Structure formats: structure tokens, C-alpha cells
Amino acid sequence: MDSLCIHYHRDFDGLCSAAILAALLRDQRGEECTWESVNYDQRRDWENFGAGTRFAIVDFHFHPEAEYWFDHHPTTFLTPQLRTLYSPSARWAWDEASPSCPPLILRHAREHWGYEPSARFEEMARWSDIVDAARYDSVDQAIFGDEPALRIARALTVAPNNDWIDGLVGTLIAQDLEQVASSATVEKAHQRAARNRDRALEQFPQTVIGEREGVLLYDASSSKIRRERFAAFYHHSRVHYAVGVIPTRSGFHVTCGENPWNPPGAGGCHIGEIMERYGGGGHRAVGGANPDSLDDARRVAAEIAGELASALSPS
Ligand SMILES: [Mn+2]
């Protein structure tokens, strides 16, 4: 029989999910797996994904041919038809209330396979919740935290290539977070990521257009500007929202997020619903859209900032 390949989302909780499932299948079922990350481009021909192979998917879209599938994303079903093909089973689980994917795999393994997870995997699950749901204690922890999980997550932002990431999954199967974070290759990437972060924090103030009613608007569309996800809240801890324009590989992206350490409260809006009106999407607290041109992106960002400011305005 062909070996089973675990396809995983290329981020911290996706890597941990792949490592945990690989260890589980090896220990519980004698199944020696391979693993390979997936990207969003592969959704285009989703019907034929993995055709003719044995595969599992973690922290990514539902596929009816997956032997094992675990996810926590509310947007996991690419079509209503795919939604009808899912029902919970001994090999599939979906829980959109889970802040990240690893805890639901461990819970499932406990309930269905009688598995008692090691402290190592419990630790990965705990940190996955913090990283994936941005449940950091403070903006300082999010940006500068040097706990092993946070160093690994930061190193991932400068991953040299996909093979390197697959290699990391292999080490997470056998070692704890501290050992993986201290390896020479992760340490080297982390140092580079930390330099990028410092540069991004330095550059952010020049991108700010203005602030009104606790809504910060910025334009980081220049490709010369490094990006740090929480730079806006690091420099402007009192704002409730940040709305900005950033470059993508093929155009421009309008990104908007609540300040996790100073949420908007009663006047707050559902960002994902606002973004849907601009052809994008997201959750209540964070979302984005990809307008056709830079001018459009700037106009959309300004409009959204205005809408959020009006909602927060006391009058
Ligand atoms: Mn993920």
C-alpha cells in the first residue's frame, strides 16, 4: 500500500497539526506517513487534489477523499456541495470554535482512538491557540516574545523554502518546542526575522495617514516597507482598529483588524461583513479585500476607516 501523505497549512498550528497526526498514526496505527504543505493556489483544482494518492489534510479545506481530515476554519468548505459530504466520523473532525487545529486533533484522538497525548503535544496545542488566535498577553509578547513557540512562528515568516518547512515538521514529531527552536537552522531564520521585525517597527510611523475616533489609517503599499502584523498597535496602543494598504505578490490588499489589547466594545463592527461588500471577507475582528488597483485599495481603506470611525463616534 502507498504511504499516506499529510497535507498541512503552512503556519505554526498547521505544522504542529501535521507533526501530531503523523506521530499518532505511527503510534496508534503503525502507519508511516510523509507530509507536504499546501497553499491556497491548490484550491483552484480542488476536486482533483491528491487524485490517485492516499492523503490526510490538517488545518486546511475539507476534501471528501481525505482519509483523515481535521480543521477549525469556518471557511473550510469550498462549496455547499462539499459541506453536504461532511459528517463527523472516526477519521474526520471540524470544530470552528477551536482557536487552532492541534487541540481538536488531540481531543479527537482521546475520544476515538483512546490516545493519551504526551506533554510535548499538549504544549504545542496550547501555543497553537495563542499564536493562531493572537491570544498574546500583550503587544510586546506578540512582537518580542521569545518563548520557543514564538521564535519558531517568527522564523516561519522567513522560511527559505517549503522543504525547510517540511523538515521542521519532522523535528516537531521527535522533539519538544525548546529543542526545535534552539536548532541552528531555526535560530538562524529567527535572527533574520527579528531584524525584519525591527526594521518594520522603524518604518511603520512613516506609513501613517491619520487617526480618527480610535481608527488608524496607514498606507504601507510600497514594496520597500517591511511588514510586522502588530506594528500599528505597538506604536498606537490606544486605537481600536487599524486599516491599511499592503502589497501582495500580484497587487494590493486592504487589511483591517481590531486591536486585540484594546477592543472596540459596543460601537464595534463586524469587519468580515464590511469586507464582503468590497469583495473580500474575514471574521468579526479581522478581515481583508483585494481591490483591482492601488488607487482602489487606497479609496477602500479610507472608506472603511471612515465607516469604523463613524460607528465609534459618540454623536
Ligand atoms: Mn493554520
Image: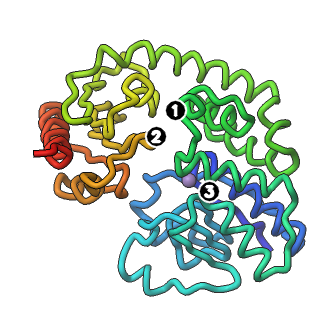
- In the image, farthest residue toward the left: 315
| Disc 1: CA contacts within 10 A as few (<14), some (14-19) or many (>=20) | many
Residue 25, image x and y in percent? 81, 69
Residue 186, image x and y in percent? 73, 29
The residue depicted at 57 percent of the width and 16 percent of the height is 195
Q: Marks 2/1: CA distance?
A: 7 Å
Q: Is mark 3 within 8 Å of ligand 1?
A: no
In front of the other: label 2 or label 3?
Answer: 2
Q: Quadrant of the C terminus?
A: top left
Q: Earlier in the sequence, mark 2 or mark 1?
A: 1
Residue 131, image x and y in percent? 59, 45
Residue that badge 1 annotates = 139
Q: What element does badge 2 sit on?
A: loop
* Residue type, mark 1 in image: Val
Q: What element does badge 3 sit on?
A: strand
Q: Is residue 292 left or right of residue 199?
A: left
Residue that badge 2 annotates = 261
Mark 2 vs 3: CB contact within 8 A: no
Q: Is residue 292 visible?
A: no
Q: Quadrant of the N terminus?
A: bottom right
Residue that badge 3 annotates = 8
Q: What element does badge 1 sit on?
A: helix
* Residue type, mark 2 in image: Trp
